[in-house]
Amino acid sequence: MKKKLAAILLLFMAVLMIPGIAQGSGQHKLVYIIPIHDEITRSLTVFIDKSIKEAEKNEADLILFDMDTPGGSVSEAVNIGKMLDETKVDSAVYADSRALSAGSYIALHADHIYMTPNATMGASAIVDQKGNMADEKAKSFWRAAMKNAAEQHRRSPEYAMAMADPEIDLPKLNAGKGDLLTLTADQAEKVRYSEGTYKNIESLLSGIGYKDAKVEKMDLSPSEKFAKFLTNPFVVPILLTAASLGLVLELYSPGFGIAGTAGLSALVLFFYGHLVAGLAGYESLVMFIIGLLLLVIELFVPGAIAGIIGAAAIIVSLFMAAGNVMYMGISILIAAAAAIIGMIVMVKIFGKQMKLFKKMILFDSTNTESGYVSNVNRLELIGRIGIAKTPLRPAGTIVIDDERVDVVSEGGYISKDVKVMVMKVEGSRIIVREYSKIEE
């Protein structure tokens, strides 16, 4: 009986130990994999924010960022770095190929960094919109930001600063003075920036205790992928140019046709992409609609105030939707230039007129050739004699054959009841002279 009881007790203890063994091998753990591919943009920030919140909501054990990026927006990298600092979920970056520029800054904010054998990390100098090195003020900010990111996670700040500042001399890492530091996988392990080199994500998860963990791979939805394409800095000017050209060409066409439809479709795609990507709010769309309404009102109301305010509202709405103000400014200038060229071509080459304005603008001229007479010319009065009915000072009234005629004296004041002669007629103006002076 004692042996049976001992066996049952041992079996019961073994059953109790099974969950612990499973937990140690990674079972019942949850890993969220979030890709950071291509350039770092505002749409990526929105996607990462949504993914981290979902991971937190589901109590994930690890958030793994699958990174392959050449860099991108510094401001968006700062926002993403802040998200990593604020989340309570353990975070790791797996540099699949490149963790360069702003990508290396994000990696430094993760709790752990891992790399593939061929991955690189660094080359994080800040550059302006033209690809040139930024000014000293911007460089100083970025150098300090990289330093703080490294120190927060107990990494040597010297290497982080060398990634951003070519003046730091690290010849042993092939980054002498004048060169930015870019770490290989082996170098990153030696300076303790990387905690291990793994061939793929599967071997990484197995190596860090998540072999049998449940994996949730986050990815952009089809609509988000389409929005990402529509908000690409090279696509935005194409959309705005198509919109401006389409609407301008529609002004020279009767009715509403293909050109107008194409222009409106381009605008719809522009705002759809920016709304879905999180770059714009509905307030920018409302501002744009208000601008359009003011432009329509301008067609029916005299003055240019409504039109000016409407045009300004449209431009403001585009900037409100912009992920990058400078890119948007360039896109608007390109679209405006295309619209002006389109108008010149339609008028000068094709001799077109804006059909829309034909119903609101009077094109007929009231000239004599068309049979219009602005006033009656009394040429038949020249040489006729009359009597001043009123004093002429110099204007007044005379009587010719019982007809009262308004006249102007040629020589100044003429008294009442004085005989006068009509000397000439200039339009509605009849000029007279005192008759006695003519005889003289």
Image (spheres, rainbow, N blue to C red):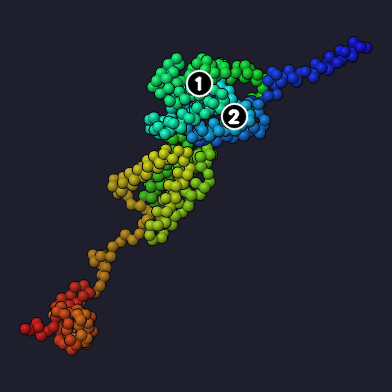
| Picture coordinates of residue 58, whole percent (x, y) | 67, 31
Q: Residues within 10 Å of mark 2 (few under 14, many from 20)?
A: some
What SS does tag 1 mark? strand
Q: Is residue 46 above or below residue 351?
A: above
Please tell me in which quadrant of the rendered image residue 434 appears. Answer: bottom left
The amino acid marked with disc number 2 is Met
The number of callouts visible is 2
Residue where numbered disc 1 is placed: 97
Residue positioned 26% across, 67% down in the render: 371
Q: Residues within 10 Å of mark 1 (few under 14, many from 20)?
A: many
| Picture coordinates of residue 429, whole percent (x, y) | 21, 75
The residue lying toward the viewer, choosing from 75 and 313, is: 75
Residue where numbered disc 2 is placed: 218
The residue lying toward the viewer, choosing from 173 and 129, is: 173
**Marks 1, 2: nearer the viewer:** 1
Residue positioned 58% across, 20% down in the render: 201
